[in-house]
Amino acid sequence: MTALHPPAPGVRDLPARPEWPDATGHFGPYGGRFVPEALIAALDELTEAYEAMRLDPAFLAEFDRLQRDYTGRPSALTDVPRFAEHCGGARVLLKREDLNHTGSHKINNVLGQALLTQRIGKSRVIAETGAGQHGVATATAAALMGLSCTIYMGEEDTRRQALNVARMRLLGAEVIPVTTGSRTLKDAINEAFRDWVTNVATTNYVFGTVAGPHPFPAMVRDFQRVIGDEAREQVLERCGRLPDVVLACVGGGSNAIGIFTAFVPDAAVRLVGLEAGGDGVQTGRHAASITGGDPGVLHGARSYLLQDENGQTIESHSISAGLDYPGVGPEHSYLHDLGRAEYRPVTDEQAMEAFALLCRTEGIIPAIESAHALAGAMQVGRELAEQGGSQPLLLVNLSGRGDKDVETASAWFGLGDHTAPTDADDRAVEAGRGADPGPGLDTDQQPTEGAVSNDDAVAGPDAGQQA
Amino acid sequence: MSRLQDRISAARAEGRAALIAYLPVGYPDVPGSIEAMVAAVEGGADVVEVGVPYSDPGMDGPTIQQAVDVAVRAGIGLRDVFGAVRAVAAAGAVPVVMSYWNPIERYGVDRFADDLAAAGGAGAITPDLIPDEAAPWLAATDRTGLDRVFLVAPSSTDARLASTVAACRGFVYAASTMGVTGTRATVGDAAERLVTRTRQVTRLPVCVGLGVSDGDQAAEVGAFADGVIVGSAYVRTLLDGRGPDGVRALSADLAAGVRRVGART
């Protein structure tokens, strides 16, 4: 069986597709299709088209071309020695999905699904989005391929991620704020499914993660596995061996499945998924579906989810909009039950500490989602250091960049003015006092001789003219 | 035979379609919802779909979700449903539970079947459960003799129509338009085509849902279907504050619709 992105012949045998799911989309007891009958024909059509396309050389060539010339693949692998000092002395490598066009791994999947949409002759795509990264990626692919595009986004998330809403609209997409339920990602998915049931004749649903009904978990995995296929080869080439641990954040779980899949057959490689622990799993305010949930059915598949004794979905909580989801992809549930992957929670606080650390040690602003994986690397690296032995090699999927999170992070760290200007701010400016920028992140920072201090900085159009 | 099929067949013997009313348990509260269901029966409903509140009702439109959200937030769950089932049976209609799958799975499939049978429920409609995924439910309903109603849709292939109706007992639920629940200005002819196709593969009654909001539409649908399912219009009545009296009046209008002279040939 051919994978989507076989490495060059001779480097490695063609990566095997995992033996799961079965023909009807089951990963052991998980997955399947729990959807209204009205969607079955569309899911069957999608499955059939995908299975044909997956092996079609013309499709694979077109997909490869887009990945290379449009997304910018292969993405870099970056050694981060200064960050690694905080990981118990482990060597840490980042797989730089943040450098992809549109700023995250989401583009890998949407280019595949947009090509598929064209192939099955539909002219419109819809998608759900949480942080906005999948929405931006879908809007991007729709613009590239001339498809009409509607994005559903929880009203709460449209506020948290206003920048991405603007990006989607610039790209020509219609963004619909969802006001039902908890007004977050899970409700956006409900609305997108409703749209799909109603408009299925013309519309394809570009699902953003490895959850949902069959074929989405398997199809999205296949489109995302390029991350791990590339990284495995890059790590072998650079280090001459496989990593000891592969880490990724898990909301729905697409970036994690993307980097895990190539390593699943490598039994000695630990796979660690970091779930959003929010305020802490014990507080009940979290989004750690595997750590703090039970198996059940949500959004078309059986998997772990956060639910109450009545089987109602419990609202999740995370500082990261992209991980703020009460479910998880069925393959993760299966990997968990098999013991092939381990899942642990990272709190908002731990994630933000790692976020700040990567910014100031490596000059890389990560997405808050990805910061959960970085926090996991800090924990696991320190645990391994305590056990002794040779220097461990950690591979972390840096799934996205943090541009969209600057406002959230500024608020978290109390940096500067992160709210809309007020009259008081205007008066301060008029009086010659700018808004207080707040303390810097790095308390170890030494004043640099000759550096421009706040008092000397030249603002606005005059900047640079005195030099 | 089954209790649902018996009741729908009895209506057919009167030369009319059955009227099937949907109302969710817990809106405006549990007693209020039971009162509304009894009023629906008094107004002329033959069957009441007793709705189980669910946080993510992907098949339902905004009207039903608005009411169900209230019940979910109040912590209403399956255990509150059996009282409503008993009340509907006592009022003289056939109660059938309408539930998304996760509340049933969470409650326990066998426990649910036992408790539903004990409460006098005829069975359950499961909008997001297809027979392919239903092995534990098929076993539980076979063991208890409960009816199990699955959905067919205009997009269902002939092969799927055949396999789905083969798993049904009681009646077949024809989702008349491609879309979610909600009242519509016109019923459209997709429903009639779907009923015709379904009849070719089953002798079970075929009932049509999704779209009917008044007596005229009920007459229109009753002319070709064995049962007319009305949900959003009932819920809209409660949301508008018209209470049990409004529900009774709507039932009477719909019941007159399915009895309209000449409606059924």
Image (cartoon, coloured by chain):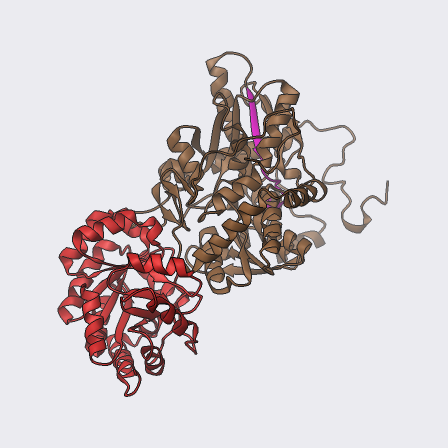
Q: Residue furthest front?
A: B200
Residue under the point 65% across and 44% down:
A63
Q: Nearer the viewer, residue A459 or B241?
A: B241
Q: How many marks?
A: 0
Q: Colour of chain A?
A: brown
The picture places residue A433, in percent across and down from the top left corner, at 69, 48
**Residue A424 seen in this snapshot:** no
**Residue B260 seen in this snapshot:** yes
The picture places residue A96, in percent across and down from the top left corner, at 63, 34
Q: Quadrant of the C terminus of chain A?
A: top right
Q: Quadrant of residue B8?
A: bottom left
| Magenta region | A393-405
Q: Quadrant of residue A82?
A: top right
The picture places residue A80, in percent across and down from the top left corner, at 63, 25
Q: Nearer the viewer, residue B182 or B27?
A: B182
In the drawing, does residue B42 fall left or right of residue A376?
left
The picture places residue A6, in percent across and down from the top left corner, at 62, 33
Q: Quadrant of the N terminus of chain A?
A: top right
Q: Residue furthest top?
A: A389
Q: Residue furthest bottom?
A: B261
Q: Colour of chain B?
A: red
Residue under the point 36% across and 42% down:
A284
